[in-house]
Amino acid sequence: MRVLTTAADDVRELLTHWIEGSRLVVVALCAAWCDTCNEFRASFERIAEARPGIVFAWLDIEDDSDVCADIDVENFPTLGIYRGDVLLHFGVSLPQEGTVARLVDEMATRTAGSVDAPEAARRLPAVLKRRLG
């Protein structure tokens, strides 16, 4: 599975998985100017390739501000992990391939939402749905 972006076709594919609700969706919130994000991108893509049953998306907080502007990103990379509209995890992650891979694998077994997540992060699937609406 390739890493999806906000290109029109990618957004439609991402929304299909979110609406379906059975597949895990992992969103990396990053910035083009962030060296850590740029270094992490290759690791994120390898994690995605190794997990074809999970959907991975890359959002740039500036280039994709129409989608994620309300989400307060304090540091990079920040990951949001969803099953359907349910946010399972939201937070800064160490940009280490093994650490992120273990986090994704752990979240793949969960169905309960995160209680500490900001409301803007919870609304991300709805914002994308409206964008195509």
Image (spheres, rainbow, N blue to C red):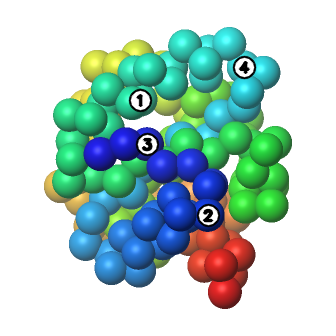
The kind of secondary structure element at disc 4 is loop
Which residue is farthest bottom? 133
Q: Residue at x 62, y 55 (%)?
A: 7
Do residues under tags 1 and 3 come within 8 Å of each other at their CB atoms? yes
Q: Which mark is residue 44?
A: 1
Q: Mark 3 or mark 4, which is nearer to you?
A: 3
Q: Is residue 52 left or right of residue 81?
A: left
**Residue that carries the numbered disc 3 in the rendered image:** 3
Q: Residue at x 61, y 22 (%)?
A: 37
The kind of secondary structure element at disc 1 is helix
State how far apart marks 3 and 2 are (Cα). 14 Å
Residue 45 spot, x, y in % from top left: 39, 30
Residue 108 spot, x, y in % from top left: 22, 52
Residue 95 vs 88, above or below: the answer is above
The kind of secondary structure element at disc 3 is strand
**Residue that carries the numbered disc 2 in the rendered image:** 8
Q: Which mark is residue 16?
A: none
Question: N-terminal of the two: label 3 or label 4?
Answer: 3
Q: Residue at x 53, y 63 (%)?
A: 9
State how far apart marks 4 and 1 are (Cα). 15 Å
**Residue that carries the numbered disc 4 in the rendered image:** 34
